[in-house]
Image (cartoon, grey):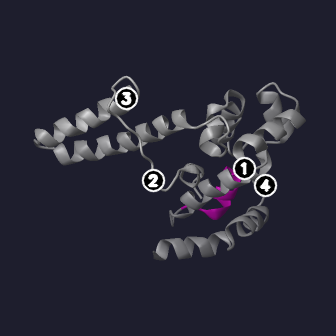
Amino acid sequence: MNPLLSTLPQVLKLKVNDPNEFPSLYGVINQITQEFKHQTVGSSYVIERYLEILCAEIIRAHKETLSEQATGWLSALKDPIIGKAIEAIHLEPKFDWTVKKLASRVSMSPSRFAARFVSCVGDSPMIYITKWRMFIACRELKNDQANINDIANNMGYESLASFSRAFKRHIGVSPGIWRTLINKT
């Protein structure tokens, strides 16, 4: 369900021989190499953090290598207009988004914005918003202490019933059943 993971290829291959091509990625690899060579107290913790940074840098580098014809969430972030709209959705998932409000946010007509969004992302803006909200809700439902009604409210749903219907339509089971299933694994 993660929009990033769904757009990544199964194998990501980047050459990092030239420090000028991907300088941040090259730097992280050098830091990891140095940490392995000179292991001291806390090296395993430091290496774990570097590996997290390495993953982020690989994704950044991959994004820069995508062709102009590529579609999907990651390539949509390269588009200055659609990237700005996605950022707004991610920053305010609870907001009562409409195509008109998103188009206004990026100074486009609603019809041109919707067409460009679909062309870049592969989903309509409203479907993307629902998918993003459900992705966040699924993460929040992993916490047994989180109240489902609060999660519904945080995702912009006015009632638990409307959230539950949307969740079941998108995920295939109710939020409560999903929580039970995910917490069993």
The dot on residue 160 is: none
Amino acid carrying label 1: it is Tyr
Q: Along the polypeptide, which appears first: circle 2 or circle 4?
A: 2
Q: Position of residue 81 (x, y in %)?
A: 72, 29
Q: Residue beneath label 3, please?
A: 24
Q: Along the polypeptide, which appears first: circle 3 or circle 2?
A: 2
> Could you tell me how far apart the alpha carbons at marks 1 and 2 are, in whole angstroms?
25 Å
How many residues crowd mark 3 within 10 Å: few (<14), some (14–19), many (20+)? Answer: some
Q: Residue beneath label 1, please?
A: 128
Amino acid carrying label 2: it is Val
Q: Do tag 3 and tag 4 residues touch (Cβ < 8 Å)?
A: no
Q: Residue beneath label 4, please?
A: 158
> Could you tell me how far apart the alpha carbons at marks 1 and 3 are, in whole angstroms?
31 Å
The dot on residue 11 is: 2
Q: Is residue 37 magenta?
A: no
Q: Is residue 149 above or below residue 81?
A: below
Residue at image position (62%, 72%) is 176
Q: Nearer the viewer, residue 51 or 168?
A: 51
Residue at image position (69%, 52%) is 155
> Could you tell me how far apart the alpha carbons at marks 2 and 4 are, in whole angstroms?
41 Å
Tell me if residue 156 can be seen.
no
User: Magenta region: which residues?
Assistant: 146-156
Dividing the image into 4 quarters, which one contains the N terminus? bottom right
2 or 4: mark nearer the eye: 2
At numbered mark 1, what does the secondary structure look like: helix, strand or loop?
A: helix
